[in-house]
Image (spheres, helix red, strand yellow):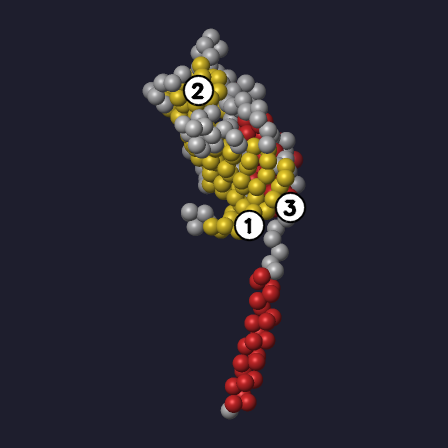
Amino acid sequence: MKRILGLFLLALFALAGCTAPSEATATPPVPQTLLGTVIGNLQQLKTFRMIIEQTGVPYLFSVTLDQGQTEVVAEMRSARAQYENPNVLYADTRLSLAGFPPIGVEIFARGSDQWFKLIGSDWLKYTIAEGFDPGQLIQDDSGFPAALSKLKDLAYVGEETLDTGEGVFHVRGLAEGQVINDLMFGLLQVSQDNIVVDVFVEKTALLPVLLLVTLPDTATEQNPQDTQWRIEVFDANAPLENTGPASSPEATAAAEAQTTAEATTQP
């Protein structure tokens, strides 16, 4: 009996010796390879939603809402947006203009055409962000792909669990200011480089679920937290929530033709 018990314990120790090292030496993902996969998955989505919140020292930028006659200083503290592939974006933003209390400004963009409206008003076709096209959000050389592929000093931080319970891979790197401008619908004019970008990738779908974009050395005595944007990405392939202003028959036909052409060229 003692011999049998001894053999059983020996087998347990041998089994533990075989399994423990494999867990301890699990190979972490290569950051560049991981983000390359994330970019490809993101570009395949039909739609996705975003929540953007700016905390810390306010970031001020110039904007005009009266056909360019007046330029005012603005601050965007938050925005809820939805992107539709290939080039449609709706955003509901909270802007503080020239120190006044925040107001709601809705923005809709289809290609190079842009509209905005204030609470209780109709859509007004007007270019708020010169040169911005929603398609830039997923193009290879701008938006999310640029934010993920052009990060310098890329490092794998580790596996983490977000407050939502999602398991994520955490990657960190440095970005140039233009990358952030593209992510913020072309509204900002960030010129600072070496911006810290923390990317959190959902482990199963391999899609970005959270980006933390931090401008280093911007904290002050009055506000000890650096300027930071928190960008949550969620609701992949959910139906478009707001279709914006009604399109003319010509614009609708052109959009449908573009969508058909892109669909027929895909493998």
Q: Secondary structure at mark 1?
A: strand
Residue 8, quarter of the rendered image: bottom right
Residue at the location (57% across, 62% down)? 23
Q: List x then y, in percent, for residue 82.
A: 47, 33
Q: List x then y, in percent, for residue 5.
A: 52, 86
The numbered mark at residue 74 is 2
For this rendering, which residue is in front, 139 or 216? Answer: 216
In this figure, which residue is indicated by the disc labeled 1?
158
Q: List x then y, in percent, for residue 106.
A: 42, 24
For this rendering, which residue is in front, 247 or 215? Answer: 215
Q: Secondary structure at mark 3?
A: helix
The amino acid on which the numbered mark 3 sits, given as a three-letter code, is Thr
State which quarter of the image contains the C terminus: top right
The numbered mark at residue 33 is 3
The amino acid on which the numbered mark 1 sits, given as a three-letter code, is Gly
Residue at the location (48% across, 20% down)? 61
